[in-house]
Image (tube, rainbow, N blue to C red):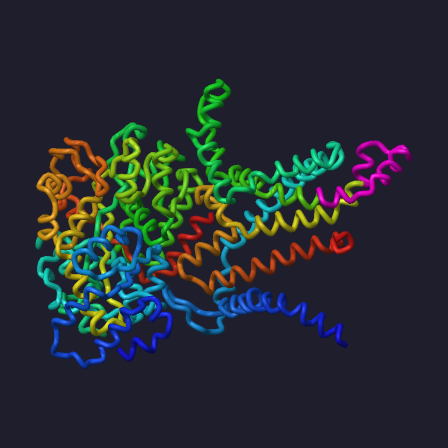
Amino acid sequence: MTEKTTTGASSLTRRGALALTGAAIGSGAITGFPTIWAQNIRNVTLRQAGTGVSGLNAIAEQCKKDTGITLQLTVLDSDALAQRTATQPRSFDIADIEYMQVKKVYGVGTLQAIDRKRITNADKIVPLFTTGRLTPQSPIAQGTAPHTVGFVANRTATAFQPQPTDWMTLIPTIYNADTLGIRPDLIGRPIRNWKDLVDPAFRGKTAIVNVPNIGIMDAAMVMESMGELRYADKGNMTQAEIDRTAAFLIEQKRAGQFRAFWKTFDESVNLMASGEVIIQSMWSPAVAAVRSRGIACTYQPLEEGYRAWGGGLGLAKHLSGLELDAAYEYLNWYLSGWTGAYLNRQGYYSAVLDTAKAFMSPAEWDFWMEGKPATVDILAPDGKVMEKAGTVRDGGSFTDRMGQVACWNSVMTEDRYMVRKWNEFIAS
Amino acid sequence: MRGAVTSWLLAAPLALVLAVFLVVPLFVLVVVSFYDYDSVRLIPDFVFTNYIEVFGSMVTWRTYAKTFTFAVTVWAITLLIGFWIAYYLTFVIEGTTKRTLLFLICTIPFWTSNLIRMIAWVPFLGRNGLLNQALIGSGAIEEPLEFLLFSDFAVTLAFVHLYTLFMVVPIFNTMMRIDRRLIEAAVDAGAGFWRVLWHVILPLCKPGIAIGSIFVIVLVMGDFATVRLMSGGQSASVGLMISAQISLLQYPAAAANAVVLLAVVLMMVAAILRVVDIRKEL
């Protein structure tokens, strides 16, 4: 805990007496009294930096109730989070981060690998995160698939291992399959392919997300769907492929295909709800938000498959002693069911399905995970009716959706080049 | 001697504040603009890549052209509107109370935030917005007008709405100081309305116009929020380009861009000050 004192006064005031307790206990005088540790975990505060997707107060409150650990949430956008993870490692204890960002930041060495043996439910984690396959037969999707950046050789190693090891970069917590959102009442015809985004019939009524890493992938799905280009790996394009994709986007923009480019969740909701846009890149909670206003909105499954993303929790390198134990306790709690059920109920998926199932009613499980028609009204976490009885989830069951993943959100080798090209498209 | 010391001491606090909060950050900005970077880190270095990318890219030139277009259009419109509002307040309205009251009314929109005033246009101009509904309802048009929102028109409209007051205030201020006897003399000498305006009022308003122009041009050149929101992310501005680079953690590139923008804006301000000596009137 000498490490702690060197962090200076700001750290002490931030965590107050807890840090002092930690320092006293961490001095090593109490080795051999593990019970004291267990009790003291109840007093630890963990600072978690994450995105708005899973930086939810409800989770922090439940965590406090179940484990006693105080979770201090900082919510940042995805890029700021990656930056903080890489450059301000002492400003957080837990990084709640996307796998694609891990590819970018893990090499900096600000996170420590997680000992798989200390994670109770490690064996029950969905194989997507360990082998990359949902079932032993299913193919591995393109892009930064989580299993490719999920393992390292030891606690301090930063090179990713192709095979599962006992040291994980992140504990997976949340993931989903993204597709296009549509206004079925305004669009006037069935939508089946990604290429419908650039159908001239919808000129001036489409939008694409202006987050380069994600937008380029949506564009790649469109290009492939049109037969314009077949990528060796959509998630790791060559410069030539990036050029072709950017040129295509610019051409579409000049033709007036897009009404807008959105950057934040609520922008996408407003575009859709106001009818400015009838087909666009969208994220699942945004679809739910449009629907909750009583406006028809479908998260349309498409023949070419989904663009998936996944996130998880990583441990800051500076964690040790009591705080590290508390962090492991928190990770184990996260996978123990309550949070999984909470996230599943919002249309995301949890990494350990069995434990989450125990916290969901059979009707909820059937609706969210099995893709069956809702037998009762499905309620949102705040108690409001989210889906009426009889509705079926867009895209169907867990295996239907996660089994159809065409690519994962990615950080490309040509990241900088891609970002420049993307900005040219936005500025063109 | 003692007087000199006092002057230095009196000036010191401001000098210190400016040094710490303006000179030092600007210095850091210039230093960082020569750094190298990768996707997460700044790498201290002395490279010209950032500037080469700024000047070598067609996007920069196009974006600057676009930003200039916005700046000039908005400047011309706000000047026209601002001048006549100031003229009306100064020469048409009789009585100080009434004039002060009307002037205060001009400032009412400024009681709420910039962003809110801007966003308020969105539901008004949208495809299913109030204006389109009214026009369709009155039978004036059949199809909603698409160019109203998420277009350069929308951006210009929002800018004019936001910044006209910055033109009104300084012009009004200089106009109020014009000695009325000069106008009387001109009229007595047989000058008509336009002649008085052109040869008496306008020259005497120059400092106000210059100050207003500096406000408007500097604000438009550096803007990113208005352009992004009102164009739906479709249009570009230099500020937006910098903000995009910052959000992607490309700080050195953003710094290089900011240095270039700063230089350009300073040159524009210098040009205005060359044409009009504002000190003369302050």
* Residue located farthest toward the top when viewing the structure as drawn: B139
Q: Is residue A87 above or below residue A251?
A: below
Query: Taking B184 as reference, is A143 left or right?
Result: left
Q: Residue at x 35, y 68 (%)?
A: A13
Q: Is residue A268 above or below residue A407?
A: above
The image position of residue B2, as x and y in percent, is: 75, 75
Query: Taking B32 as reference, is A348 left or right?
Result: left
User: Magenta segment: does it hold B120?
Assistant: no
User: Magenta segment: does it hold B187?
Assistant: yes
| Closer to us: B275 or A382 | A382
Query: Taking A185 as reference, is A126 left or right?
Result: left
Count of labels in the image? 0
The image position of residue A124, as x and y in percent, is: 9, 57
* Residue located farthest toward the front when viewing the structure as drawn: A17
Q: Is residue B42 above or below residue B107?
A: below
Q: Please, what is the dominant secondary structure of the magenta stretch?
A: helix
The image position of residue A318, as x and y in percent, is: 27, 72
Q: Residue at x 49, y 38 (%)?
A: B151
Q: Residue at x 53, y 37 (%)?
A: B153
Q: Residue at x 21, y 39 (%)?
A: A383
Q: Is residue A305 visible?
A: no
Query: Taking B272 as reference, is A312 left or right?
Result: left
The image position of residue A298, as x and y in percent, is: 25, 35
Q: Classify residue B79 by image quadrant.
A: top right
| Closer to us: A369 or B51 | A369
Please state, as top left, top right, bottom left or bottom right, where the N terminus of chain B lies in the image.
bottom right
| Closer to us: A275 or B94 | B94
The magenta span reads B172-200
* Residue located farthest toward the bottom when viewing the structure as drawn: A29
Q: Is residue B116 visible?
A: yes
